Image (cartoon, rainbow, N blue to C red):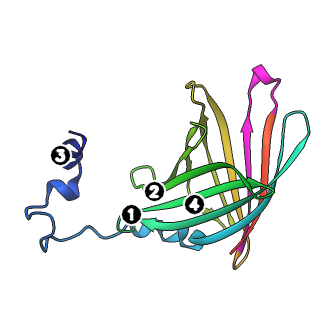
Amino acid sequence: MALLAAAVLSPAVAQATEPLGSSAKRVAPTPALQPLKKLTGKWTCTGVTTLPDGSQLAFDTSSTAKFILDGNFMRWQETNSIEGTPIASAEYIWGWDAQQGLFTADRFDNSGQRGAQTTPGWVGKVLTSTGVLIQPDGTSLPLTTTITKTAKNAFTVQAVVSLGAAAGGASVLSESSCVR
């Protein structure tokens, strides 16, 4: 049923008059996503998370980013580990909202969290996205992620999650350095 609804709502599918697998004209990938091309590839990152109590936890991240679905989205998959033991994994799907003129980043992880962020794009060497991190119980926390290109094959990532008034305004800060 979901596929039928998608077919009705999707202009590309709704306008297709030929069966799948025929020579029907395909929709071209959105050129708006091309600024994200500099993030594609395999990345190795080292980082540290500073918890609300001030303690720090070092971690490593292995990531792969590539365009998917005929170039209309970019998938970022990552696995975080401590001393070689996997502790978490997440997947981000980047897209383009032409109506708002913003990149979108939808996040899902193996702890049941999900997130939604937007960004107008690169400002020089910096890409800052803002939005929310939604917990499995439905509560949401403000989330800001900043990617800074530091070299042709390197960047840093800083993520800040605000825990809100209930936690005394505390936040969790994660900072990583990544290389290709």
Look at 84% across and 38% down and name the residue there: 51
Q: Is residue 153 above or below residue 63?
A: below
Span highlighted in magenta in the image: 154-170
For marks 1 and 4, give the CA distance: 16 Å
For marks 4 and 3, give the CA distance: 31 Å
**Mark 3 highlights which residue?**
8
Look at 59% across and 50% down and name the residue there: 90
First in sequence: mark 2 vs mark 1: 1
**Mark 1 highlights which residue?**
72
Q: Quadrant of residue 47?
A: bottom right
**Mark 2 highlights which residue?**
95
Q: Position of residue 123 (x, y in %)?
A: 65, 64
Mark 3: amino acid: Val
Crowdedness near tag 1: few (<14), some (14–19) or many (≥20) residues, C-alpha within 10 Å: some
| Residue 158 belongs to the span the image colors magenta | yes
First in sequence: mark 3 vs mark 2: 3
Crowdedness near tag 4: few (<14), some (14–19) or many (≥20) residues, C-alpha within 10 Å: some
